Image: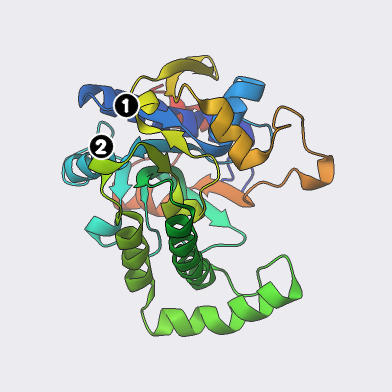
Amino acid sequence: MTNNNQIDTRHYHQILMDMLITFDKMCKEQGMTYSLAGGTLLGAVRHQGFIPWDDDVDVFLLRPDYERFVEIYSKMELPKPYYKIVTLKNGVKEISFARMLDQRVRVDHERSNSVTTAWIDIVPLDAVPEDPKWQEKLVRKLSFYRKVRIVANAKMGSGRTTWQIIVRSTMGPLIRKLHLQNAVCKRIDRLAKKYPFEKAEYFAEIVAKANFNGMGRIDLFKSPEIIEFEGYPFMCMPDYDAYLRGQYGNDYMKLLPKNKRIAHGVATFINEEYFEQNGLELPDENQQDVLVEDM
């Protein structure tokens, strides 16, 4: 740990693992099926753990279980007092899905204001029809609102192109000033839930990605496989190959060139404010293991 209480990558990965293990236990307690998702699932398949340059964790729940999970755990005390579930249902305006937070860890995200503590993303999978016209219409709407959400959460001056920097620096403050983030996220949520789950055979990650890449079968999701991630067994969708091909291309098992190995751009620190507010002793620079002692 440096003098400014920065947390190194190894310990930050352990903190994320602690949250993931807790999430696994919470789902099992309620009889819910989940799956590792995104780069976390890719890491499990390709690296049997974290992609070396990755700095977050993603998990999926089918929409009915997601709604039940949010309803149960956004109201009750979590297994560890420093954990918190944040969603649209309990006043969070920046995101259209749920997050589990570890409030002991402060995060400085170089591109976004929506992340301030250590987190894992808990993303619902929504029912979708096979009708291409229906999909195209929905994606068009979702893509617009998703872009607005990203612009609203972006830090001033962030962006990979000059156009992105200009748009985020001008439109972002205006959206925030008008307090439109919550309305935009609620609109994404309503659109994603539009197709009845009872009628569907397929799911897609439309609430976060706003596309139909990596669609999967609902019936298969309900019979998960077990996959190892950092030495622990977790659930994953049995048709993960089709999902990963849809998200990352047919050659997803190949490592990206070094210039494309891009993480989210986060720096992590001991959240001094949390420790002070709760009357806890602040770990010193030689006590990073204190943060993961419960694993």
Give how far across and how far down residue 181 sits, in percent. 39, 72
Could you tell me how many numbered marks the image carries? 2
Residue closest to the eye, 93 or 222: 222
Is the residue marked by circle 1 packed among few (<14), some (14-19), or many (20+) residues within 10 Å? many
The answer to whether residue 42 is visible is yes
Q: Quadrant of the C terminus?
A: top left
Q: Position of residue 255 (x, y in %)?
A: 77, 32
Q: Between 286 and 179, which is closer to the camera in this rendering?
A: 179
Q: Tell me the element at label 1.
A: loop
> What's the mark number on residue 65?
2
Query: In the rendered structure, which amino acid carries the disc numbered 1?
Result: Thr
| Residue 279: numbered disc | none
- Who comes first in sequence, dot 2 or dot 1? 1
Residue 121: image quadrant is top left
Q: Quadrant of the N terminus?
A: top right
Callout 2: few (<14), some (14-19), or many (20+) C-alpha neighbours within 10 Å?
Answer: some
Q: Which amino acid does label 2 sit on?
A: Asp
Q: Helix, strand or loop at disc 2?
A: helix
Q: In which quarter of the image is residue 234?
A: top left
Q: Do the residues labelled 2 and 1 touch (CB within 8 Å)?
A: yes
* Residue, disc 1: 33
Residue drawn at x 22%, y 46% as measured from the top left: 74
Q: Residue at 59%, 76% (x, y): give it.
A: 168
Q: Where is residue 155 in the image (x, y as percent from the top left)?
A: 57, 69
Between residues 211 and 46, which one lies in front from this camera angle? 211
